[in-house]
Amino acid sequence: MAAVQLNGIYKRYGETQVVHGVDLDIEDGEFVVLVGPSGCGKTTLMRMIAGLEDISGGDLTIGGTRANALPPQQRNISMVFQSYALYPHLSVYDNIAFGPRIRKEREDGFKPRIEAAAKMLNLSNYLDRLPRALSGGQRQRVAMGRAVVREPSLFLFDEPLSNLDAKLRVQMRTEIKALHQRLRNTVVYVTHDQIEAMTMADRIVVMNSGRIEQIGRPLDLYDKPGNLFVASFLGSPSMNFVAGSVMSDARGTALVLDDGVRIALPEGRATQGARVTLGIRPEHIEAGGAADVPFTVEVIEPTGAETHLYGKIGGNSWCVTTRARPGVEPGQRMTLGLPLAHLHLFDTESGKRLD
């Protein structure tokens, strides 16, 4: 296994810089997920760790060894890609054995590893089959088996579940997490799916425009996002936002929206007259609450266990999630309760969290 350190890593293509001075320490045996929107630099960063992209500047250390100039085969890593990259004319066994054979390992040396990996990944009954006879999830397991057999110190996963349907994605992310818990190898996992990040990671690295926005444990980032970008990116449905000015009077401190709607705020969280953006997650809103926050329902989306109400507050689109079966129709007005303990406040200009 191996710890990984990135110190001031950046990537430039000609005059265009796409990764800007990334600093990141990954502990030995840790499962770290790089997450962010398309084009944020997460895959480029992973490819630099893998040795598939040159590092324009900074230092990369893997297992205590500076790896900037090391070729991929000398970094003791295995990478699982978005595409399964299986040889269609080879059996499952031969696909998994391809790497050891290229490295000229003895068959009696790697065969037990293949059998152990196949058992771990529920592939023992499929070793003689060709890839075309497998489901998408089984093909991805073969790609994982090929990585496991190499016995790397570092696993790299580049959006491995994006080609699977929703049900298989749920199943496979559980299996990848279980695999990590058995092997305890260091894992760096790239995805744009924040649900994958929340459910799989020991720590999440949120990236945007080639920079790290925030690093932390999944629930820490969810409960206390450091800025508006992280707050809006993590969570499904996304956090609701509304901007206004902080005002204090005999009734207490409140955020006053441009249309005059007043939302009570915790005392001491923001300065009088400051321009502030308030955020609250849909599941923390009390539908039909006692607070005098008017909400006009536009769309009702029942999902079974929950119901999502989409509408507007002060011209801002909001979502309210409730486990109750609300007796409202599109076009109706209702009031919302916004518990003070669940309010997030951000400086509107800088986007930074106000503690």
Image (spheres, rainbow, N blue to C red):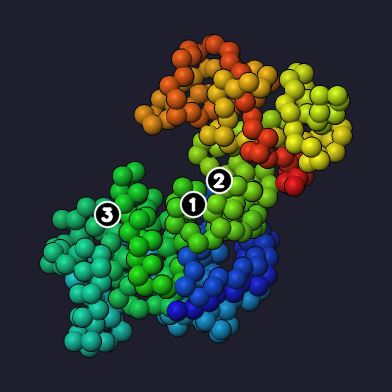
Quote the CA–CA distance across marks 2 and 3: 26 Å
List x then y, in percent, for residue 156. Answer: 44, 67
Cβ atoms under marks 2 and 3 closer than 8 Å: no
Left or right side of 120 for 7: right
List x then y, in percent, for residue 287. Answer: 55, 23
Left or right side of 126 for 166: right
List x then y, in percent, for residue 172. Answer: 33, 55
Please give the residue where the numbered disc 3 appears in the rendered image.
Answer: 137
The residue at the point 45 percent across, 29 percent down is: 323
Q: Which mark is residue 248?
A: none
Q: Vertical placement of 84 versus 111: above or below?
A: above
Secondary structure, mark 3, is: helix
Camera-side mark, 2 or 3: 2
Q: Amino acid at mark 3?
A: Gly
Q: The N terminus lies in which quarter of the figure?
A: bottom left
Q: Which mark is residue 234?
A: 2
Q: Earlier in the sequence, mark 1 or mark 3?
A: 3
The residue at the point 38 percent across, 61 percent down is: 177
Camera-nearest residue between 250 and 101: 250
Quote the CA–CA distance across marks 1 and 3: 21 Å
Please give the residue where the numbered disc 1 appears in the rendered image.
Answer: 198
Secondary structure, mark 2, is: loop
The residue at the point 25 percent across, 58 percent down is: 139
Secondary structure, mark 1, is: helix
Label 1: how many Cα within 10 Å (few below 14, some 14–19, many 20+): many
Quote the CA–CA distance across marks 2 and 1: 8 Å
Q: Vertical placement of 67 versus 319: above or below?
A: below
Work out whether residue 41 can be spotted.
Answer: no
Cβ atoms under marks 2 and 1 closer than 8 Å: yes
Q: Earlier in the sequence, mark 2 or mark 3?
A: 3
